[in-house]
């Protein structure tokens, strides 16, 4: 049989407690102790009572238990018919709602103690005896009784440990906020954070406590990355609000709105993850050849205006594309695009000035804001979802791209939140 647990907070252990204390208390001595402690209430556990509590006094006998005065109020508040202190009260019945909640706690709770106690209650609800539960859970009989009695008295609150005494917390909520602020600004290790806490806050803690505090706040230890991209969040939000206004105006028919970008499609499909047998590599044949470049404008009414080139996309090709796009729309047009060099090339500035007189407005997005250009999602869908992961020659590549671009809006659709 598994060894006895060191402590059980829901219910004290009796039995050999007198031997551990080196005391041989007889029935007469217990009665004398009761008379000497009038502030405690006594219950006869052989006679069922309508009041419940969890006694905590270490002195007991076969017939009597001494109830601490702290729990005297609890006794009076229990409804008639609730659990008596008698060990005869071993039946446990759950409602469907309680059973479902306990099952969820058993499966998902982060506290292993709560999971085990919930499992104990569920097993007892199935009609298993305490001995059967002991065999299945490999815990002591008294522990099972503790879990059972805690549930019958306190319900779901009985699954959690009661507050216990100990040293005050060394890290307050303010200290944890300071830690979060430090790690957001610089890549600190836990020992470095501990040293800084000691120097600046006067708090002496362990490395483990620093790590626990950061995990509690949702931080994990992971490798950092170098990045040259630093986005101005205020500008990003401002442009995002402007685009929303333009979308509303386009719905009213005041102006048309289009998202423009270019992308290249190689004959070798972009690499991706795949289910692979352990110890092996998922190999795909790669074809060498030219890239098929596509210019696309996603118009606010859901249409897609495109052009394909088996050559490098130049500023001149872009200027011609914009002229055809404005002519196709047939009304004032605002085009949202990024800051690629061909979009701002000097050689097409005269053409852009002429198109501006005809109603074309170019709005350049702030740096590192691809999510504001909806056509970016089209490229991702095409390369990673709509096109099969396989090698192609020039003819099959162009045919696949034509099929998707031609079927956009019917066979191939995108949804924007």
Image (cartoon, grey):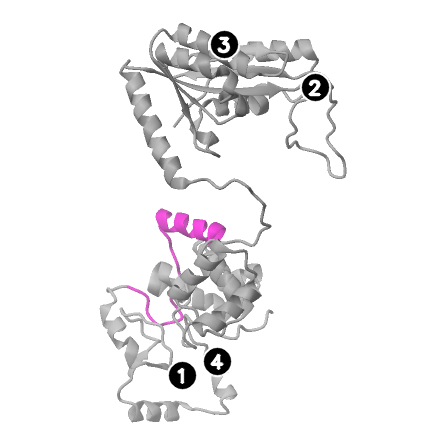
From the viewer's perspective, tell me whether residue 220 is left or right of residue 30: right
Mark earlier in primary sequence (1, 3) = 1
From the viewer's perspective, tell me whether residue 84 is left or right of residue 143: left
| Disc number lying in front (3 or 4) | 3
- Measured in 3D between alpha carbons, the distance from the residue under mark 2 to the one under mark 1, in whole angstroms, is 81 Å
> Residue at (45%, 9%) from the top-left corner?
323
> Residue at (57%, 9%) from the top-left corner?
402
- Residue for badge 2: 391
Q: Residues within 10 Å of mark 2 (few under 14, many from 20)?
A: some
Q: Nearer the viewer, residue 172 or 367?
A: 367
- Measured in 3D between alpha carbons, the distance from the residue under mark 1 to the one under mark 3, in whole angstroms, is 97 Å
* Magenta region: 82-109
Are the residues flagged by discs 2 and 4 in contact, CB closer than 8 Å? no
- Residue 15: mark: 4
Q: Quadrant of the C terminus?
A: top left
> Residue at (40%, 9%) from the top-left corner?
326
Q: Quadrant of the N terminus?
A: bottom right
């Amino acid at each position: 049989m598994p060894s006895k647990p060191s402590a059980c907070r829901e219910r004290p252990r009796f039995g050999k407690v007198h031997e551990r204390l080196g005391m041989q208390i007889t029935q007469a001595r217990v009665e004398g102790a009761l008379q000497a402690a009038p502030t405690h209430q006594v219950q006869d556990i052989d006679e069922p009572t309508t009041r419940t509590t969890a006694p905590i006094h270490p002195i007991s006998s076969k017939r009597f238990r001494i109830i601490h005065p702290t729990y005297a109020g609890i006794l009076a508040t229990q409804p008639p018919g609730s659990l008596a202190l008698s060990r005869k009260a071993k039946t446990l019945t759950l409602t469907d709602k309680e059973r479902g909640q306990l099952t969820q706690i058993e499966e998902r709770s982060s506290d292993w103690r709560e999971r085990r106690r919930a499992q104990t209650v569920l097993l007892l609800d199935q009609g298993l005896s305490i001995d059967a539960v002991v065999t299945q859970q490999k815990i002591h009989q008294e522990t099972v009784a503790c879990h059972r009695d805690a549930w019958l008295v306190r319900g779901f609150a009985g699954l959690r440990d009661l507050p216990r005494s100990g040293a005050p917390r060394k890290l307050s909520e303010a200290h944890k906020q300071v830690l979060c602020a430090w790690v957001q600004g610089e890549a600190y290790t836990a020992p470095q954070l501990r040293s800084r806490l000691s120097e600046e806050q006067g708090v002496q803690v362990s490395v483990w406590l620093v790590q626990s505090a950061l995990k509690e706040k949702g931080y994990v230890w992971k490798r950092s990355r170098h990045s040259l991209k630093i986005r101005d969040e205020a500008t990003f939000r401002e442009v995002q609000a402007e685009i929303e206004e333009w979308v509303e105006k386009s719905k009213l028919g005041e102006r048309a709105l289009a998202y423009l970008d270019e992308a290249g499609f190689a004959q070798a499909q972009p690499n991706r993850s795949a289910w692979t047998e352990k110890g092996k590599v998922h190999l795909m044949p790669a074809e060498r050849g030219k890239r098929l470049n596509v210019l696309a404008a996603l118009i606010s009414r859901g249409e897609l205006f495109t052009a394909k080139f088996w050559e490098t996309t130049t500023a001149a090709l872009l200027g011609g594309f914009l002229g055809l796009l404005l002519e196709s729309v047939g009304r004032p047009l605002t085009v949202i695009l990024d800051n690629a060099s061909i979009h701002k090339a000097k050689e097409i500035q005269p053409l852009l000035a002429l198109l501006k007189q005809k109603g074309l407005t170019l709005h350049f997005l702030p740096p590192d804001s691809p999510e504001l250009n909806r056509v970016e999602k089209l490229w991702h869908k095409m390369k990673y979802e709509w096109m099969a992961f396989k090698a192609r020659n020039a003819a099959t590549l162009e045919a696949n791209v034509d099929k998707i671009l031609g079927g956009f809006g019917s066979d191939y659709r995108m949804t924007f939140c």
